[in-house]
Image (cartoon, helix red, strand yellow):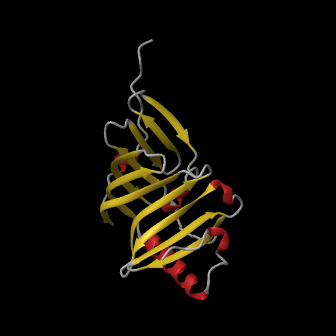
Amino acid sequence: MLAAPAAAFAGPSTSDKAEIARVEAYLNRITTFKGRFLQASSTGEYSEGSLYVSRPGKIRIEYDPPSPDLIVADGSSMIHYDKELDQLSYISLGSSPATILIEDKISLTTGGLTVTGIERGRGTLRLTVEKTDDPAEGNLTLVFSDRPLSLRKWVVVDALGVETTVSLLGVRFGVPLDDSLFEIPTPPSRDE
C-alpha cells in the first residue's frame, strides 16, 4: 500500500501519533551502530561502503573504491574528504535531512520538522518528515521493519527531486566504536 502524496497528508491521527512516539523512542535508545550500506540514486549513481554512527553528533560514511569519498562528523564539524584530490570540504551539520539520526535528542515533530506521511505495510513502517519552514528543500523517509521495530533504510529527496536511498546491511546496534573513527582527517601537506 502506497502512502498518499505528502501534500494530501492531513496530519497525524491518534494512531499515527502513537507510531511517531514509538519511532522517536526507538531512535533515541540507539547510541551507536555500524554496518554496511548500499546507496542508489534516481540519477543512476550507485555506491556502497561502511557506516558508523555514535550519537550525539558523530558519523563516518566510508565509501568503497572506486569512490574516493569519506564523510566524517566529529560532533561539531562535518567534512567531505575526497581522497583522490586530497581535499577537505566543510559541510553544514544540518545539510542533509538524514543528520537528524545523529542529534542528541531525536524528535520528528519538533525542532523544525513536520511528519508529512506515515505508511504501514506488511511488516514495515515508513515515516516521512520535512523541514517545517522549508518543505521545498526536500524530505526524509525512514523505513523500518516492524515488530520489532528496526531501522532498515532511509530515502532522501532533495530540492531538485533527486531521490537517494541508503539501505543498511548487517547493522549492529549498541556496539563499542573507537573515537578515532570520528576524527576529521588531515590531508598530507604537499610540497610547493
Residue 156 at least partly seen: yes
Q: Position of residue 108 (x, y in %)?
A: 57, 70
Residue 4 placement (x, y as % from top left): 59, 73
**In x, y percent, where is residue 33?**
35, 61
Indicate whether 168 appears above or below 119. above
Residue at image location 51% in from the left, 81% down from the top: 19
* Quadrant of the rendered image containing residue 17: bottom right
Q: Residue furthest bottom?
A: 14
In the picture shown, does residue 94 fall above or below 146?
Answer: above
Q: Is residue 175 visible?
A: no
Quadrant assignment for the C terminus: top left
Please tell me how many numbered marks the rendered image carries: 0
Look at 38% across and 32% down and name the residue there.
83
Query: Residue 23, relative to residue 153: is it above or below?
Result: below
Q: Residue furthest left?
A: 170
Q: State the image quarter where residue 34 is shown.
A: bottom left
Q: Nearer the viewer, residue 4 or 134?
A: 4
Q: Residue, x 51% and y 65% (percent of image)?
A: 141
Q: Is residue 116 left or right of residue 166?
A: right
Which residue does the image show at 46% across and 29% down from the upper left? 87
Near-viewer residue (18 or 181): 18
Q: Residue furthest right?
A: 133
Q: Is residue 118 left or right of residue 82?
A: right
| Frontmost residue, 72 versus 76 | 72
Give coordinates of residue 55: x percent, y percent.
45, 60
Q: In which quarter of the view is residue 174 placed?
A: bottom left
